[in-house]
Image: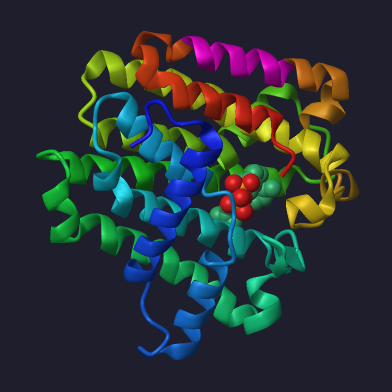
Amino acid sequence: MGADMDLKTYIAECGTKINAAMEKYLPGEDILPHNLHRAMRYSVMAGGKRIRPVLIMASCEAVGGDAESVLPVACAMEMIHTYSLIHDDLPAMDDDDYRRGEPTCHKVFGEAMAILAGDALLTQAFVLLSAPETREVLPHGASSKLIHILARNAGSYGMVGGQAVDIESEGREIDFPTLEYIHTHKTGALILASVQAGALAGGADEKAFAQMTRYGELIGLAFQVADDILDVVGDQKLMGKTLGVDEARGKATYPSFFGLEAARERALELRDMAVAAVEPFADRGDLLKQLAHFIVDRTF
Ligand code: GRG
C-alpha cells in the first residue's frame, strides 16, 4: 500500500483502516457490561497519532509483507498503548485531566471503571492476537512469537518496568543510566515491539529482523527524547494534554540533564542512526525513514 506514498497520506490511510478494524475488534457498547465497553471505546476512539500501528504496518511492508494482514496486530498494540495511557492518567500516577484533547477516562467514567477499562483493553489485545482468525492471516508460527514480543515489552521487562522506575525516581536525583532505562522501557519498549512485530508478521529473515530491531531501538529512544523536549516547548492544544508536567513533578528528562539544545542534538543523532539502519531496505524502507523524521520533528 505504501512504498511510494508520502507519510502524511500513509498515516491518514492507516488511521482509517485501523479505526475501522478497531470498531470490529472492540466489544460493542450494546454488550454487557455496557459502561465498561463504553469506557474502553471512549479512550481508544478519542484519537491519538496511531504511531505504533503505523510503525507495525510500515515495518511489515518494509520487509515485503502485506500491511492489511497485520491490522489485528496493529489494533492489539494500540489497545495496549491506550490501556497504559488510561492507567498513567489516574490520580495514583500522573493524575491528568486531559488526554488526546478530551477529559481522561477516569474523569468521565470514575476511577474504578478507568482501572477496569485499562485491564480489559490489555486483555482484549491478547484475545485478538491469539484468535484463530488472526493466526490464519499471519505466517506459520508467527502468532505465538508475536504474543511473546508484545507481552514481554508491555510487562515488567518493558513498559511497566519503566513506569515503575519512573515513579520511584520522581523528585530524586537519578544518574544517566537510570534515565536511559526509564526512556527505553517506559516508551521505547512498545515502539521497538511495534517494529519487531511488523517485521516478524511480514516474514523478515534473521538479518532483516536484526536491522529492524536496531531501527526500533533508536526511534524508541528518539521518541521519548522528543517527548521530553515537547513537554518544555510544546503547544498544549496541539498535544492534547497538560504540558510542563515533568518539571512540576521533579522528573529527570533529557533537557533537565543536558539542556534543551543538547537534547535536540541527541534526538537528531538518534534519528540519523535510525535512518541509516533501514538503508539496506532501499525504497521499501522509505516510510520508515520518514517516520524517524516525523518522530523527532513532530509538534504533537
Ligand atoms: C501505566 C503501565 C503504565 C505505563 C505508562 C504510556 C506511559 C507508560 C506513560 C505515559 C506518559 C508519557 C508521557 C510517556 C511518554 C511517551 C508516551 C508514551 C506518550 C504518549 O504516546 P503518544 O504520543 O500518544 O503516541 P497518542 O495519544 O498520540 O497515542
Asked whether, in this view, residue 21 is left or right of residue 260, the answer is left
- Residue at horizontal 32 percent and vertical 69 percent from the top: 24
Identify the image quadrant of the N terminus.
top left
- Tell whether position 267 is magenta: yes
Image location of residue 77, percent across then percent down: 41, 51
- Residue at horizontal 76 percent and vertical 57 percent from the top: 241
Residue range (magenta): 266-276
Asked whether, in this view, residue 275 is left or right of residue 255, the answer is left
Is residue 47 among what the camera can see? Answer: yes
Residue 278, by quadrant, is top left
- Residue at horizontal 35 percent and vertical 60 percent from the top: 125
33 or 291, nearer to the observer: 291
Is residue 252 among what the camera can see? Answer: no
- Residue at horizontal 34 percent and vertical 25 percent from the top: 62
In the displayed structure, would residue 32 be above or below residue 271? below
In the displayed structure, would residue 271 be above or below residue 166? above
State the predominant SS element of the stretch in magenta.
Answer: helix
- Tell whether position 166 is magenta: no
Asked whether, in this view, residue 162 is left or right of residue 150, the answer is right
In the displayed structure, would residue 79 be above or below residue 69? below
Image location of residue 128, percent across then percent down: 28, 61
Identify the image quadrant of the C terminus.
top right
Image location of residue 159, percent across then percent down: 52, 45
In the displayed structure, would residue 82 be above or below residue 226? below
Image location of residue 69, percent across then percent down: 24, 46
Residue 279, by quadrant, is top left
Give the colouring mode of the picture: rainbow
120 or 176, nearer to the observer: 120
263 or 66, nearer to the observer: 66
